[in-house]
Image (cartoon, rainbow, N blue to C red):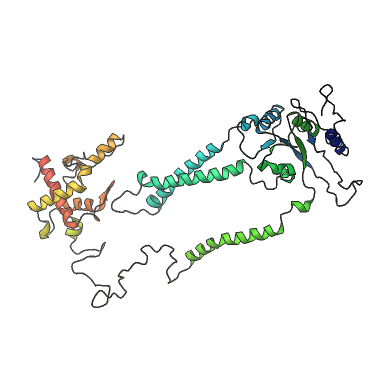
Amino acid sequence: MIDDDDNTPDSDDPEVKAALDKQETKDVAEGPAAALAHDADPAVVVVTAPGHHDDDGDDGDDEDDEVPGELYGVLAEFDSPGALVRAARKVKDAGYTEFDCYSPFPVHGIDEAMGIKRTILPLLVFGGGITGTVGGMFLQWWMNAYDWPWNVGGKPTWSIPANIPIAYETTILLSVLTTFFGMWILNKLPQVWHPFFKLDRFLRASDDGFLLGIEARDKRFDQARTTELLVKAGATGVDPCHLDSDPDRRKLPTFLYGVIVVTTILALIPLALIAKARATKSNKPHYHIFEDMDFQPKAKSDAPFDAFADGRANRGEIAGTVARGSRNDDTAFHYGLQNGQWLTGWPSVPTVQPTPELMKRGQARYDIYCAPCHGFDGQGHGTVPERVKESGGLYAPQNLVDPVKGVVEQPNGQLFNTISNGRNTMLGYAGQIPVADRWAIILYVRALQRSANPGGPR
């Protein structure tokens, strides 16, 4: 026990006497002479003296004895989470900065006691998420609207609503990766080589031990004074920790080199297979884990097919069909051109001659394809520009009935070309509206222009 009047150990106590006997061989220059008293609760504290100890009792020249390396720090144990929090607060108040606490479970209030600042990980995760959002949007714009634009059914090549799902996924992906790797980097993990792991006392950190370690690189570190501070803070035991002095023990085990080589080769195999697939050609189909519709029963043009009497899947050319994109001899009907000039009248095709039936057909097609932008009266006040205006944007479709705008004076062939191939922000409707229906729409547009300009040319 400790005498309260003079703070000196009572040598009559068998436990203290045994502790003092154990410390007789300590290095006075590196550590305290004996255990120090706890201010609030006097008790015997086990302080392991630094330096070299011979368990066999000889003079210390035994070649098999381990010589401790450079001092790394000291590790103290406390008997409860509350004692650990109080000790952390005292160590912080004493000016130490290079220390950490270890416990089997999270201890409430330990961060504040240690003076740990708020982590910057949330800001890093936010930055990763923003990078994922911008990167996902840019990736889709680059591929779909710039590098390889496709006009699918008149849809816009760039549309934010259509790109939101992919941008959402890239946002989550970058956020998760930043969280995972950011946590490891900020915590300086993994540290499987940490010197404290060699101490027997540290094994209790995952069971029932509450430990506090101070590193020797701290500017206020002095082994004697630091040990004294920890003892007065309530430590039940303090151990010095030395770096391993044997160079061979600090080398990576030989078998790990083999593991690294094997895992590296295995990791390169998928990349090699991808490179091979891109650089070679084969007449065999790829491997399909999910066959889906790749191998469904279907008729191929140059393959046999038993469903027909002649056993051929190719049924030959169907009468009256024209390949998409091919030139047609009737340029007036299919392109609105006559002798290289825009057609002013109507093609010499019976089905597109001006009749009340064709007018009615043109009105129906106009209301479906044209009225959403140009309006039912042709003046450009459809539902689409109105909604754009309500959202703060500006979209002004062409006024089809205003003689000043020039549409009234355009030949029929030019109007047909505009409907087929588009103009300015308007995309072409050749893939959606049949040729005859396009001429029917032109007939109805002429009727709208006549009703809006009664005194104009017929």
Residue in front for this viewpoint, 298 or 114: 114
Residue in front for this viewpoint, 103 or 431: 103
In the displayed structure image, the side of residue 5 where residue 112 appears, left or right: left
Q: In which quarter of the view is residue 86 placed?
A: top right
Residue 117 seen by the camera = yes
Q: In which quarter of the view is residue 43 placed?
A: top right
Residue 340, horizontal then vertical, whole percent: 20, 58
Count of numbered marks: 0
Residue at the limit of the structure toward the right, as seen here? 59
Rendered residue at 16%/56% (across/down): 436
Rendered residue at 19%/53% (across/down): 416
Q: In which quarter of the view is residue 231 placed?
A: top right
Residue at the limit of the structure toward the bottom, as seen here? 310
In the displayed structure image, the side of residue 406 where residue 138 appears, left or right: right
In the displayed structure image, the side of residue 90 where residue 385 appears, left or right: left
Residue 410 seen by the camera = no
Residue 237, horizontal then vertical, whole percent: 76, 36
Residue in front for this viewpoint, 291 or 33: 33
Residue in front for this viewpoint, 171 or 361: 171
Residue 101, horizontal then vertical, whole percent: 67, 36
Compared to residue 306, the image places residue 210 above or below, namely: above
In the displayed structure image, the side of residue 296 where residue 328 appears, left or right: left
Rendered residue at 38%/54% (across/down): 148
**Quarter placement of the N terminus:** top right
Residue 77, horizontal then vertical, whole percent: 72, 36
